Amino acid sequence: MKTRITELLGIEHPIFQAAMSWASSNAPLVIAVSNAGGMGVIAAGPMRPADFRNALIEIKQRTSKPFGVNIPLISPRAPELLDIAYEARIPVMVASQGGPRDHLKRFRAIGTKWLHVVASVEHAKKAEAAGVDALVVDGAEAGGHPPPSEVGTLVLVRRVAKAVKLPIVASGGIADGAGVAALLALGADAVQLGTRFIATPEASVHENYKRAVLAADVHDTTLVGRGKLPVRQLKNAFSAKYEAAERAGASASELEEIYNSSSMKKAALEGDVEWGKVEAGQSAGLIDEILPAAEIMRRLVAEAEGARRRLMSL
């Protein structure tokens, strides 16, 4: 499958593994996906600078294929992480949560392709005007931080595709090759999967987290923190407490206190899937087994080809 994204980045398949704090804040998952012909992306946001630097060294030692780095630009540690990424001459940046304009010249000088994560038409147009190479468009089904507007992937990706000329990576609600084919048919140039790659041996999260993803159905996620930066996570004791306070008319400060009482780290590293933020997308309901990342890539490609053939036969 050749698309504008595969040509731009030099990857074999138009499939990205999403940057997920803790789950892909490591080298093995990125290496496995990239070696299988996709785009593995390391989530640098929660990493210590030394760990991030060492992970980049390991990735470069174990794959000659392109890989990506995600850095939330609003993070206080972003300048240091950006410097490490620059020193490592990373091939692809998948930046989020901030403006790219101030960084493009430096990274373009070393040949880095810059993709920017957006969740609205407005931000897509701003990123295009800033000069990025491509966009990752997150729909409401996605885990982590989906668009506050709660517009679904099918509608948002199509709307952005009509508004900009840049290549688009569609993200949110995809767990199999049929979803990959559907988003490519919609006009995307590649598709990004996050939750599917949590259920892998290579994902660096607690086994309780992985089992919670397997046990979830499509209706078992919720948005916590509507009205600011919402988080899509699996329903649990923490989300129930927050939503009960919302219904009871709790003040903004009371809701913020509850929101800040939990973290993804509590679930991902400590295994507390009741009181931690178990970030996952609606596609968790389509996942029922833990598989090596390379096998997931193989199946995604085969399933997408099967979906393409089915459409051609109609």
Image (spheres, rainbow, N blue to C red):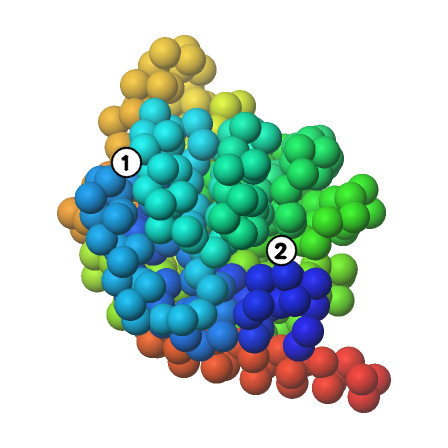
- What SS does tag 1 mark? loop
- Residue 149 screen position, x and y as percent: 63, 33
On the image, which quarter does residue 242 sit in?
Answer: top left
- Determine crowd level at label 1: few under 14, some 14-19, many 20+ residues with C-alpha closer than 10 A: some
* Image quadrant containing the C terminus: bottom right
Percent coordinates x, y for residue 65 in the rendering: 44, 70
Residue located 22% across and 53% down the image = 54
Q: Is residue 282 left or right of residue 260?
A: right
The structure residue drawn at horizontal position 49% and vertical position 75%, both measured from the top left corner, is: 37
In the displayed structure, 95 sits above or below 306; it is above
Q: Amino acid at mark 1?
A: Ser
C-alpha span from label 2 to label 1: 28 Å
Q: Which mark is residue 44?
A: none
Q: 225 and 81: which one is in front?
A: 81
Viewer can see residue 158: yes
- Which residue is at the front of the view, 212 or 135? 135
Amino acid type, residue under disc 2 in the picture = Val
Residue 46: quarter of image: top left
Q: Along the polypeptide, which appears first: circle 2 or circle 1?
A: 2
Residue found at the very far left of the displayed protein:
270
Q: Does any portion of residue 223 appear in the rendered image?
A: no
Residue identifier under label 2: 169
- The residue sitting at 73% across, 85% down in the picture is 310
Q: Which quarter of the rendering shows the N terminus?
A: bottom right
Q: Which residue is mark 1?
A: 263
The residue lying toward the viewer, choosing from 121 and 176, is 121
Graded by Cα atoms within 10 Å as few (under 14), some (14 to 19) or many (20 or more), the crowding at tag 2 reads many
